[in-house]
């Protein structure tokens, strides 16, 4: 398993207050931040589906945000048949942890499972997972997919949280729960009847594992067979063990510059464990823009959410001169990611970096530039 080098310079990479680090912890743990049932012909690979061009103008637009010599960055704009890319310390083969962008894959898989008749949106997940008579057993797929289940952001067990926090601040890969251990954590969660909507990594992990159980497989195989292969995500993977981390993964760094181990996440992997290149996410975006997922129910509003709306694990907003945007950000201990899809104009912006800081603002700026034609 590749690890970040310990030869990082002594000076902090970027200043980070305690608040920023705490936010990074929460978002880092976020990395724990519908095809038809009949088989379809395999789509072209990302390199065949679009014409890639390295774009000097795009590089100039992102360069001010990345001034550290250790920065590894890949950015792409999908626009029709064109794929504009820009790289800093990276190339098209460099892989990144995409954190909670992974949750959008769960949403599409849920829509696919509903289409196949494997599950229904209002099915309690206790029908598919061994949750006994715990409150979590009565939570439905749609409640999980819209973060309205009442489950907490992370398991509330204080000993578990203390261990995770300690490991995170040391830059360690801290999540190694098996599926039975994940279910044990879920069984221990009380869910008050009046619990408000709350972003839940625990809920996302349970949703992914329940979909895998309904399909009679494991979650990594489900992803591979129903999204990675059909869309031509040639190098995307879901490593759940250390020896599955790809050699092409960039070295990750915490927000304060310390090295971060790759995050494998184990049973929490559905919530944020995908590793992918910018070309992989470009192929994914095209699958949503005009491919087999263009009309997925996952992309329909299902729940009001913090000034926007929530589809099934997709954040949906109307802005940018009325353009409909489907998006999600991701943050692991050592990586930041953002995917924004303009469903009105059929374009997408992807930002991937090897620093444990958000890149959503940069993605939003780039999307605004694309819409304005800057």
Image: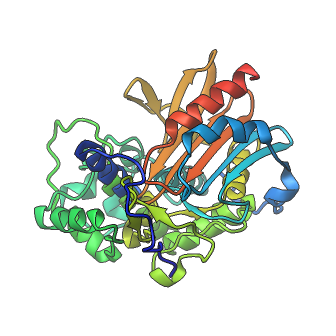
> Is 136 located above or below residue 346 in the figure?
below
Q: Left or right: 122 with respect to 221?
A: left
The structure residue drawn at horizontal position 40% and vertical position 50%, both measured from the top left corner, is 141
173 or 108, nearer to the observer: 173
Whether residue 35 is visible here, answered yes or no, is no
Q: Left or right: 17 with respect to 374?
A: left
Q: Quadrant of residue 46?
A: bottom right
Whether residue 322 is visible here, answered yes or no, is yes
The structure residue drawn at horizontal position 75% and vertical position 47%, both measured from the top left corner, is 85
Q: How many marks?
A: 0
Q: Left or right: 326 with respect to 165?
A: right
Q: Position of residue 133 (x, y in %)?
A: 18, 62
243 or 128, nearer to the observer: 243
The structure residue drawn at horizontal position 65% and vertical position 58%, both measured from the top left corner, is 89
> Is 15 located above or below residue 32 in the figure?
above
Q: Position of residue 346 (x, y in %)?
A: 74, 33
Q: Position of residue 345 (x, y in %)?
A: 74, 27
Q: Quadrant of residue 264?
A: bottom left
251 or 361, nearer to the observer: 251
Residue furthest top as drawn = 321
> Is 149 located above or below residue 61 in the figure?
below
| Image coloring type | rainbow
Q: Position of residue 357 (x, y in %)?
A: 43, 48
Residue furthest bottom as drawn = 243
Quadrant of the snapshot with the C terminus: top right
The structure residue drawn at horizontal position 14% and vertical position 43%, both measured from the top left corner, is 192
């Amino acid at each position: 398993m590749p690890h970040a080098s310990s030869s990082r310079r002594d000076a902090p990479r970027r200043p980070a207050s305690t608040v920023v680090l705490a936010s990074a912890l929460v978002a880092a743990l976020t990395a724990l931040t519908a095809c038809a049932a009949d088989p379809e012909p395999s789509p072209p690979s990302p390199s065949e589906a679009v014409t890639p061009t390295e774009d000097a103008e795009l590089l100039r637009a992102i360069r001010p945000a990345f001034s550290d010599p250790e920065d590894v960055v890949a950015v792409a704009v999908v626009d029709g048949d064109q794929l504009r890319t820009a790289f800093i310390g990276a190339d098209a083969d460099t892989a990144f942890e995409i954190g909670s962008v992974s949750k959008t894959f769960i949403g599409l898989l849920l829509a696919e499972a509903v289409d196949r008749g494997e599950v229904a949106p209002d099915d309690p997940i206790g029908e598919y997972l061994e949750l006994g008579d715990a409150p979590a057993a009565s939570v439905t797929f749609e409640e999980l997919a819209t973060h309205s289940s009442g489950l907490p952001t992370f398991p509330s067990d204080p000993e578990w949280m203390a261990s995770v926090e300690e490991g995170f601040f040391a830059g360690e890969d801290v999540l190694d729960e098996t599926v039975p251990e994940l279910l044990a954590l879920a069984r221990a969660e009380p869910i008050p009847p009046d619990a408000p909507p709350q972003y839940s990594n625990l809920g996302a992990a349970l949703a992914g594992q329940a979909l895998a159980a309904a399909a009679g497989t494991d979650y990594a195989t489900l992803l591979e067979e129903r999204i990675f292969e059909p869309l031509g995500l040639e190098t995307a993977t879901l490593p759940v063990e250390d020896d599955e981390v790809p050699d092409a993964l960039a070295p990750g760094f915490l927000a304060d510059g310390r090295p971060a181990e790759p995050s494998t996440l184990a049973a929490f992997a559905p919530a944020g464990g995908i590793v992918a290149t910018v070309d992989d996410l470009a192929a994914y975006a095209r699958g949503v823009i005009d491919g087999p997922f263009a009309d997925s129910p996952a992309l329909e509003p299902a729940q009001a959410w913090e000034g926007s709306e929530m589809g099934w694990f997709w954040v949906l907003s109307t802005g940018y001169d009325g353009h409909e945007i489907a998006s999600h950000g991701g943050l692991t201990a050592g990586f930041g990611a953002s995917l924004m899809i303009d469903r009105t104009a059929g374009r997408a912006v992807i930002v991937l970096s090897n620093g444990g800081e958000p890149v959503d603002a940069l993605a939003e700026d780039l999307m605004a530039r694309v819409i304005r034609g800057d």
